[in-house]
Amino acid sequence: MGCLKFRYSIFILFIIMRYCLGLILVLFTSCHLSSTRGLEFPSVDTLKLSSELFLSEELLKPEKMWIHDSLCLIRSSKDEYFFHLFNIAGTKICSFIGFGDAPAEMLSPVDFDVVNDTLQIYDSGKQKISFYALSDLSYGNVENICRQLSINVMASSVICTTDHSFYYLGETNRMYGFINSKIDTSYIDFPEDYRMLNSGLKHLLFQGHLRCSPNFDRLVYAASRFGYLQVLSPQENGSLSLVKDYFVQQPIFRDCSSQDMTAMSLSRENQSGFNDLSVTDELIFALYSGRKANEERSYFANQVWVFDWDGNPVKKMILPQDAWSIYVDQETNKLYTISYGEEKGEYRVHYNIYDLL
């Protein structure tokens, strides 16, 4: 009987300690690092809708777009194919990459970019990067994969800097990694006040967006679950040095992990971070939400924060309509946004266009 009482006491003590640890985490993450570290924008502009892009084929859930010259590429998550190419007038050219394990299919294409007229798509399910020539796609040739690169990394974002080197974000035990034929390492740890969390929890918490400047001399990271942004400088050996960072607000969450899995729950008071990033030669455009989980349309955003590549705030732009993602075409100086939702009982998708001031 004494042994049972002892075990029961130990069990109760374990429950109390686990509860207290969770409470400490919530208090810690809701009270620390509240400073925005001097984030003040010199000006605030309210944009006016210039026009709207109308596509010849309706997509169920478009999530991200890329536009250049006469082409518009859109990734969608609920259609038969993940990627859809249109001309700038909205006429469909082709759809490609369905769900599956075949060479021309993907499991989870979480990130893509276009560099030097080559489409790069990272599939986290297969842990591969596939490369397509835009010249082939523009003629509807979707079968020709230029090459595929197996990277053996489970990341949330991948940026290729050369044919055989790339940075990645969000593997379980590191914030950033750099891989080429000789190096596989990581640089810049997670922010100091979050290093106490287990690696899986950090991976979940710091998921976000990673983009590189067109000349590859800067990187920018923006967290999606809370307001945190970093500007980074790559070094010759692949390491990264921190140029500037901003904690807009810290996450409010609860550790729900068990022995079998890592899990977390964001508080309804937690403010969402950055929905998307778009970059040009001189500027960073970050789509910021700041909305609490209990607010209406909390997963959308209507603020575009603009920084230079030294991390200095340039301006804040207010959108008249909520957006899910953005793309800035520096050749035409236009901002494109994707937004969708219920309107008068009907599901609508908008591809809005704004002239940048």
Image (cartoon, grey):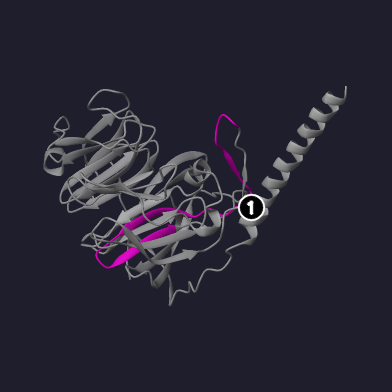
Residue corresponding to mark 1: 269
Q: Is residue 10 visible?
A: yes
Q: Residue furthest right?
A: 1
Vertical relation: 239 (above or below) 41 = above
State left or right for residue 349 relative to residue 90: right
Residue 256 image position (x, y, % from top left): 62, 38
Vertical relation: 55 (above or below) 357 = above
Image quarter (top left, top right, bottom left or bottom right) of the N terminus: top right
Residue 213 image position (x, y, % from top left): 26, 60
Name which residue type carries label 1. Glu
Q: Residue at x 54, y 54 (%)?
A: 194
State left or right for residue 71 relative to residue 271: left
Image quarter (top left, top right, bottom left or bottom right) of the C terminus: bottom left
Q: Which residues are magenta?
A: 259-287
Residue 204 image position (x, y, % from top left): 49, 43
Along the viewing direction, whichever of 246 and 291 lies nearer the viewer: 246
